[in-house]
Image (cartoon, grey):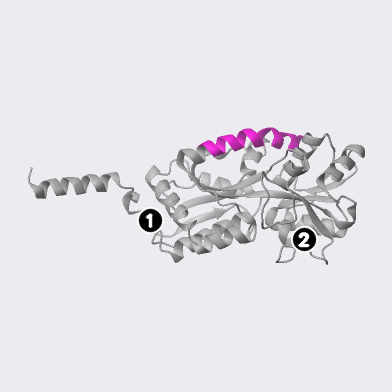
């Protein structure tokens, strides 16, 4: 074989082995569906990554975020049924696993092709300042003594509801769960005195109760008494974990990117690579800090295994939540 032919053969082999865009993908704009209204945590994840991808020309095509209102199953099903051509992806979170386990929806994460996990957020427990609960043990002791008398604001079957049930299971306590909604609604219910306890994402705990310096806001009627994480977060300097208080509960939710089931592997891999590169940009690093997200990136088999593990953990608690 001549040197020229050898060079051409090696070049061709390298091109075949390298990750490629299937049939010139992407050749048009890509849609990312968020099955929630604008402004929520999944929406902010999607918009931050879409902006980082465009700003750094990681795909060469615009990435637009589409909010699908109504029950989250509507937007999730839209992507599940979409053409598997790499032009529609879904951004969801751990609630998808809970809804499937509880029978709220008749499909689940295995009906998609996993793309990537782009971060993890943990829940925090809030109470009113005048509640008399200075720490998590005070709250759980009261919930054990006065079974079912303490109103805990939740979105029935949601992450905040499941975190409350985990606390019940660990401490032999009982709350009176009241349908309120998401983080902002629960903060309003706490402030108004309709509820005594709420579980919100760590970023919500900071925004609702603290100054920019991490000190307890004097004008807030609410305080955070526990972070449901394995370790403390320096961005919540005055909030101990449940485990530090002797309560073995950790409850965090991941940011999931999923594709229609039959989407070509090379397209999924290329999109995952764009997300991974985006996660290293200044924009996403700032987003992680602002949203109190723990940077964690998984793709391929590692992400699929993570989903299986989370489903096994979430399933029993989700069934409890809907049974109540």
Callout 2: 10 Å neighbours few (<14), some, many (20+)? many
Q: Nearer the viewer, residue 123 or 106?
A: 123
Q: Give the labeled residue for mark 1.
A: 26
Q: Quadrant of residue 158?
A: top right
Above or below 291: residue 103: above
Query: Which is the main secondary structure of the residues drawn in magenta?
Result: helix
Where residue 191 appears, as percent x and y from the top left, is 84, 59
Say which element carries label 2.
helix
Q: Quadrant of residue 219?
A: bottom right
Where residue 115 appears, as percent x and y from the top left, is 48, 46
Q: Nearer the viewer, residue 170 or 112?
A: 170
Which mark, residue 71? none
**Which marked residue is nearer to the observer: mark 1 or mark 2?**
2
Q: Nearer the viewer, residue 295 or 305?
A: 295
> Is residue 104 visible to us here?
yes
Q: Which quarter of the rendered picture does the C terminus lie within? A: top right
| For residue 146, side relative to residue 10 (left or right) | right
Magenta highlight on residue 123: no
Q: Give the labeled residue for mark 2.
A: 209
Magenta highlight on residue 307: yes
Q: Residue at x 43, y 60 (%)?
A: 29
Q: Residue at x 63, y 49 (%)?
A: 72
Above or below 10: residue 168: above
Q: Residue at x 86, y 57 (%)?
A: 129
Where residue 14 appears, as percent x and y from the top left, is 25, 47
Where residue 92 appears, as percent x and y from the top left, is 58, 49
Question: What is the tally of numbered marks visible in this picture?
Answer: 2
Range shown magenta? 305-324
Say which element carries label 1.
loop
> Is residue 324 visible to us here?
no
Q: Earlier in the sequence, mark 1 or mark 2?
A: 1
Callout 1: 10 Å neighbours few (<14), some, many (20+)? some
């Amino acid at each position: 074989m001549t040197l020229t032919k050898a060079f051409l053969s090696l070049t061709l082999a390298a091109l075949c082995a390298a990750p490629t865009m299937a049939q010139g993908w992407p050749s048009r704009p890509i849609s990312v569906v968020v099955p929630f209204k604008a402004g929520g945590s999944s929406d902010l994840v999607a918009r931050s990554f879409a902006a980082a991808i465009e700003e750094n020309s990681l795909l060469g095509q615009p990435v637009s975020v589409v909010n699908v209102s109504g029950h989250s199953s509507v937007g999730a099903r839209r992507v599940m049924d979409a053409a598997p051509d790499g032009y529609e992806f879904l951004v969801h979170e751990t609630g998808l696993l809970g809804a499937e386990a509880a029978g709220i929806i008749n499909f689940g994460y295995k009906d998609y092709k996993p793309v990537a996990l782009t971060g993890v957020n943990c829940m925090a427990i809030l109470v009113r300042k005048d509640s008399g609960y200075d720490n998590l043990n005070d709250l759980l002791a009261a919930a054990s003594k006065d079974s079912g008398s303490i109103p805990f604001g939740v979105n029935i079957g949601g992450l905040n509801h499941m975190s409350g049930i985990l606390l019940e299971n660990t401490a032999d306590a009982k709350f009176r769960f009241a349908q309120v909604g998401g983080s902002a609604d629960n903060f309003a219910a706490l402030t108004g005195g309709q509820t005594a306890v709420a579980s919100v994402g760590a970023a919500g705990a900071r925004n609702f109760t603290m100054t920019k310096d991490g000190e307890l806001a004097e004008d807030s009627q609410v305080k955070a008494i526990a972070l449901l994480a394995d370790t403390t977060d320096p961005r919540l300097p005055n909030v101990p974990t449940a485990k530090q208080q002797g309560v073995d509960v950790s409850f965090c939710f991941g940011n999931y990117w999923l594709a229609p089931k039959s989407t070509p592997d090379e397209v999924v891999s290329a999109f995952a690579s764009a997300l991974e590169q985006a996660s290293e940009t200044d924009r996403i690093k700032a987003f992680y800090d602002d949203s109190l997200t723990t940077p964690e990136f998984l793709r391929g088999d590692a992400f699929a295994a993570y989903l299986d593990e989370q489903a096994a953990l979430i399933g029993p608690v989700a069934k409890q939540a809907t049974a109540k």
